[in-house]
Amino acid sequence: GHRSHETIKLCKAAEEHGIHLFCLPPHTTHHLQPLDVGVFGPLQKQWQRRSEVIMEETREGIKKHDVIREYMKARDIAFKQETILQAWKKSGLRPINPGIFTEEDYAPS
C-alpha cells in the first residue's frame, strides 16, 4: 500500500482496538473490495425495484422522510449472508486466495 496513507497514531489506535491493518497490492483495489465485487450490485437492483414499486403505488416516488426506511428494506433483501460470503470469496480475501489475480490485474488501469 501507499505509505502516505499510514500514520503512527492510526497504527497505534488500531492496535489498541484490536483492528488489523493491511496494505493492498497496487492496482488491485477494484478486485479486493468485496462490497464492490458482489454486494452493491444486488443492493442497487433491490433499491431500483423498491423505487419502482413505490412509484407505481404512490405516483410520487419515495419521500425524503421515507428514504432510510425504504433503503433498509432493499438492504435487508440484498445483504444476504450467502451473497456477502460469495463476494469475499470472489475477491480472494476469504478464504485467502492469492492465485485469484492474473498479471493483467496488477497492471495500471
Image (tube, helix red, strand yellow):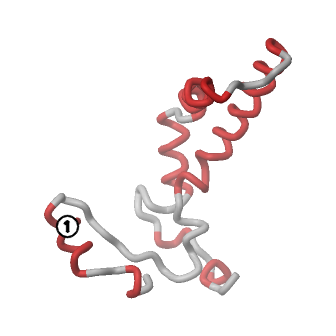
- Residue 49's place in the image compared with 26, above or below, is above
Q: Residue at x 26, y 65 (%)?
A: 20
Judge left or right: residue 22 versus residue 62.
left
In the rendered view, tell whether residue 99 sits above or below residue 7: above
Which residue is at the front of the view, 7 or 60? 60
User: Quick check: 100 left or right of 47?
Assistant: left
Residue 71 placement: quadrant: top right
From the viewer's side, name the closer residue of 80 and 46: 46
Residue 48, by quadrant, is: top right
User: Residue 72 location in percent, x, y?
Assistant: 55, 28
Q: Residue at x 72, y 25 (%)?
A: 62
Residue visible at 44% across and 85% down in the picture: 2
- Residue 100 place in picture, x, y as percent: 55, 68
Q: Quadrant of the N terminus?
A: bottom left
Residue 20 vertical placement versus 11 (above, below):
above
Extreme residue toward the top, this view: 57
Is residue 9 left or right of 106 when viewed as pictured?
A: left
Which residue is under mark 1? 13
Q: Position of residue 67 (x, y in %)?
A: 62, 29
| 103 relative to 12 in the view: left or right | right
**Amino acid type indicated by mark 1:** Ala
Residue 39: % across, % down: 59, 45
